[in-house]
Image (cartoon, rainbow, N blue to C red):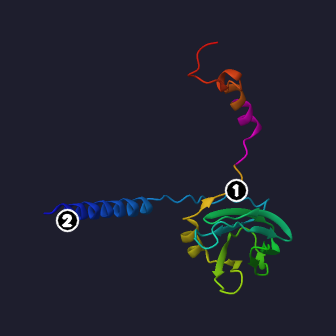
Amino acid sequence: MSYSKRRLHTVRQIVFLSVVLLVTACSNKASTFVPAPQDADKGSIVYIYRPSSSTNFMMSPKVVIDGNEKFSIGSGDYRYVYLQTGKHAVGLNPTDQYFADAALSLTVEMNKSYYLRVKTSLQFEPDTMNTRKFWIEEVAEKQALKEIADTEYSGPVMQQTNADQHNASENSEGFTVDKTQDPFAGKQ
């Protein structure tokens, strides 16, 4: 076998091995979705998620509920909120970078979970700026659970109780200047 044929054969083997490793790594991704705890006092749970997509992935529209901006939602993220029984308007705040459809009207019932998917599109237009658009749609639970499993929670970290905070502060040594010094520097 000539040198160039052996080299081509080696390159093919490397490419094949790389593809196998990539497919294996992607297929072993564990779901990060953890259902929020039910809390009748807080209301029903509404999950808002945005499947991973290369379309408009660098934009994170702000979710607006009943006229109040709540949080931004990035590509591949999910969050949840508790809403009381009744009608609510859930939408996205438009900006000068993208359009947003009108808010979705959601009628919330007691002890029920709702799943809202943030969708996006990008239209290439030769003579003008590209048109970017976001909207929210309600999704059936079975379909939503499949899609939300491939997203990551991007909400606030669960807060510690006062007892947990007290125990953590007792067990830590606290901040000292010694911890900030270069360990490789000579003693002074």
Mark 1 Cα within 10 Å, few/some/many (few <14, many 20+)? some
- Quadrant housing residue 111: bottom right
Give the quarter of the figure containing the C terminus.
top right
Residue drawn 70% across the image and 79% down it: 133
User: What residue does disc 2 label?
Assistant: 5
Rendered location of residue 8, percent (x, y) = 25, 64
Q: Find out whether residue 164 is within the magenta segment.
A: yes
Residue type of the residue flagged with mark 1? Gly
Q: Which residue is mark 1?
A: 155
**Quarter of the view holding residue 13:** bottom left
Q: Is residue 156 magenta?
A: no
In the rendered image, the residue lying farthest to the top is 188
149 horizontally vs 77: left or right: left
In the image, which disc is placed on residue 112? none
How far is disc 2 from disc 1 in space, using C-alphas? 54 Å
- The residues colored magenta run 158-167
